[in-house]
Structures are given as C-alpha cells and as structure tokens.
Amino acid sequence: RRAAASAAAKQRSEVAPEGPPPAFSSRPPRWTDNEDEQLRAIVKRLHPVIANTSQIQPEQIRDIHWTAVSDGLHKSKIERLTRHHRSKLERDSDGAAARVPSVPNAYVRKPAECMRRYTKLRGAAKGGAEKAGASKGPWTEEEDRKVVDLVSKHGP
C-alpha cells in the first residue's frame, strides 16, 4: 500500500506544471559598468569620508545607509531611461504628452545587492583579496617601484 502511494506521489511530481513559463528570471541582471560608476558616486555623495578612505573595513560598509543608496541608484536609472525614451513621446496639438512609453529594464537593486557590490568593488569582501578581485600573479614593475619608494620613505 505504501509503495503504491509513493509511486503515485512520484508520478504527480514528475508531471510538468501547467501554464506558461515565468515571465521574469529569478536572478537579477548583471551589474553594468555604468551602474558601478553610479554606485560609487552615490556612496561618495552620501558618505564622503568612507568613500575617500584607501582601505575600507567591513564595519564601515555596514555604517552606510544602503536603502538611500539603492533609492539613488534607481532614481538615476529611471532618469537616464526617461531621457533616452523622451524622443519617443507622442505629442498632441497642445504639446502635452499623449502617451508615455513604458520604461524597460528598470530593475530596482535591493540594498543588500548594493552593499555586496560595493564591498566587492572596494576589495573588502569576506574571504580575502582574491575573492574581491585582486590578482594572484607576480607583482608588476609599477607595484615594485611603489614598494621601494614607500620603504625608502617610511623605512622597513
């Protein structure tokens, strides 16, 4: 009896769900270079002391108001997309807008996404510098010169 119930349950789970596939992906879109620049600019405007430090600590990242950063990022994206689509507005005889086109790709970055991305951009990711995007290869000539200059200036 249990075997029959188990087989029936398995058969129900293998049946494809009815209806069309979901319209939206469950994954957020990749970060663009433009979004990275905007994220840095917004953090610099809202938290200039943190943004201008050369080494950032995880505690400092937690002090940033990420909801305000997310809102600013979304606002700048909507403004940019609206400017882009402004030429597509249809005007009536009075000059008033008759129809406003929809704004595509207006994905709202969540505060946690902004925090993770900024952490990665600044190299303060948990798990070390390699995880944050630093190279593991040999030092470049410029890096060697910089180390020699700093050691001669500050001592070993």
Image (cartoon, grey):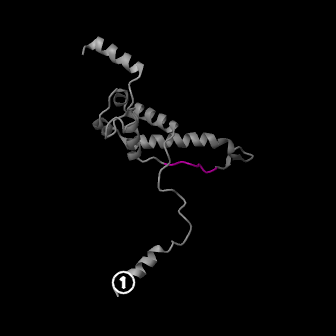
The quarter in which the N terminus is drawn is bottom left
Residue 138 counted in the magenta span: no
Which is the main secondary structure of the residues drawn in magenta?
Answer: loop
Mark 1, secondary structure of its residue: helix
On screen, residue 52 above or below 30: above
Relative horizontal placement of residue 2, taking residue 31 as reference (left or right): left
**Which is more toward the observer, 17 or 134?**
134
Measured from the top left, where is residue 72 in percent x and y?
A: 46, 40
Q: Which residues are magenta?
A: 101-107
Measured from the top left, where is residue 27 in percent x and y?
A: 47, 53
Residue shown at the point (65%, 42%) measured from the top left: 86
Q: Amino acid at mark 1?
A: Ala
The quarter in which the C terminus is drawn is top left
As drawn, the residue found furthest toward the front would be 138
Dot 1 corresponds to which residue? 3
Mark 1 Cα-neighbour bin, 10 Å: few <14, some 14–19, many ≥20:
few
